[in-house]
Amino acid sequence: MGETDVVIETKSYDRTSETIQENSETTKQLVQYPSLFTSKTLLELCSSSWSRSSKANEDVQPYLRGCKWSPDGTCCLSVVNNDGVHVAELPKNLYFGSVSSTRTIDVLDSVIHVKEAGLVYDFCWYPFMNSAIPESCCWITTRQNAPVQMWDAFDGSLRCSYRGFNAVDEMEPALSITFNREGSRIIAGYKKVLRTFDVERPGREFAENKISSPASCLAVDSYLLAVGSWNTTISLYNMTETGTYKSIGKMHGHSGGITHMKFTPDGLKLVSGARKDHRLLVWDIRCYRRPLNILSRAVNTNQRIYFDISPCGKYLVTGGTDGILKVWDVDQADWRDSLDSGDIDRDNVTYKFPLHKDCCNSVSIHPCRPILATGSGQYHFEDPVKSIQESEVQTDSVYRNGEHDDFSEDMRYSWKAENSLMFWWTGDVPDLT
């Protein structure tokens, strides 16, 4: 498909968006979102893993760097380092009903594999993606030395590109991307500007707004845009219908560059996480001068560690570099309530699940089923102690066999590398003993 092809016709696009919004609102009224983590245990449903080719260089490490459920819940999009983008489908026997504790674990196969070269900076689904409407099934990515690209979710073909050019007519890669709530515009964050593209006009037509610091991540809710930066600040903007942005203010509190943000379903709170910062900060956007609450997780590297909030707004779930999944239930640990300064160092997490032996870098909650997707992996550096002792065969052999654990405390030097995508059942298991 050529890059000049029209992605979605204007009239059908608007009708599609309105129809899906009306259907989703009706569904919310008729169907209650399922309860999560009621059995206080997780049941593994499916798994997939990646390994380095025998001919590949040792520096090539294909670990998962993020996963996101599609808005209709039929498939999961994941980015693998040095291996592009993968799409895995949810088994159809998990669309309805419950599961048994004796259920066989499915091996996930990628139904689509886009072998993108270069580092993928960011990715996201079209917000009204519905498998029954083929033209809505797509996602966008931004990667090193490339424009924003839209991909077809049925065959993995490139639909079109959105190019941002600077003052000297050089194409720049976006650092972060997202759709607006209506799905009619793509918002791309660059080092010095925000560029807004019309979804139906691929190419180099865009509206530009200057910003003071690089946009490392974006979050959108209604007419609000939150822009996280590597300088540890979060900027709030009011988005207008014409594609311009009016600054509201800045939020300070993190000790590292912002890597991920997400609004709560009610749109009143914003949760943010940063690199090499063990805190998740909860902000009340009506009074954003200081964090409303502080939650703790393990983040020892610069890697982006995703978190997610359930569609019902009751659960906050995050991974960590220690491989532990943490869950906050608003009924048992009110993570959205005001901060008690005397409890800053206290971990008020509701549940802990040691799911992975390597870094748990991504989590994604299914939009309508009690299913959780998690991803693991990170870049493992060569241990400097091992390098010094390479000539000593006996010492090196002991180290390889895991008998010498003094130098394996830092997971970056650990031999226990895990690169996997897993689906977990978080609802009730009737026959669980």
Image (cartoon, rainbow, N blue to C red):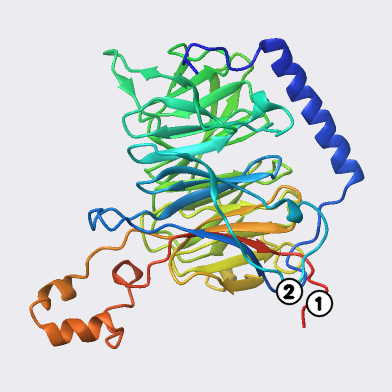
Give SS at disc 1: loop
How far apart in space, not on screen, are marks 1 and 2 (Cα)?
6 Å
Q: Which residue sits at x=58%, y=71%?
A: 343
* Viewer-nearest residue: 143 or 303: 143
Q: Residue furthest right?
A: 30
Whichever of callouts 1 and 2 sits on the residue coming sooner in the sequence is 2
Answer whether labels 1 and 2 touch (C-beta < 8 Å): yes
Residue at image x 31%, y 30%?
145
Q: What residue sits right under mark 1 in the picture? A: 431
Q: Amino acid at mark 2?
A: Ser
Q: Residue at x 45, y 20 (%)?
A: 162
Count residues near mark 1 (Cα–Cα under 10 Å), then give few for <14, some for 14-19, many for 20+: few
The spot of residue 153 in percent (x, y) is 58, 33
Residue that badge 2 annotates: 101
Q: For residue 417, what is the image quadrant? A: bottom left
Question: Which residue is found at the position 54% from the left and 22% from the top?
Answer: 245
Q: Amino acid at mark 1?
A: Asp
Q: Nearer the viewer, residue 32 or 107?
A: 107
Residue 156 coordinates in the image, percent (x, y): 52, 32
Q: Position of residue 154 (x, y in %)?
A: 60, 33
Q: Is residue 156 visible?
A: yes
Which quarter of the rendered picture does the C terminus lie within? bottom right
Looking at the image, which is closer to me, 417 or 88?
Answer: 88
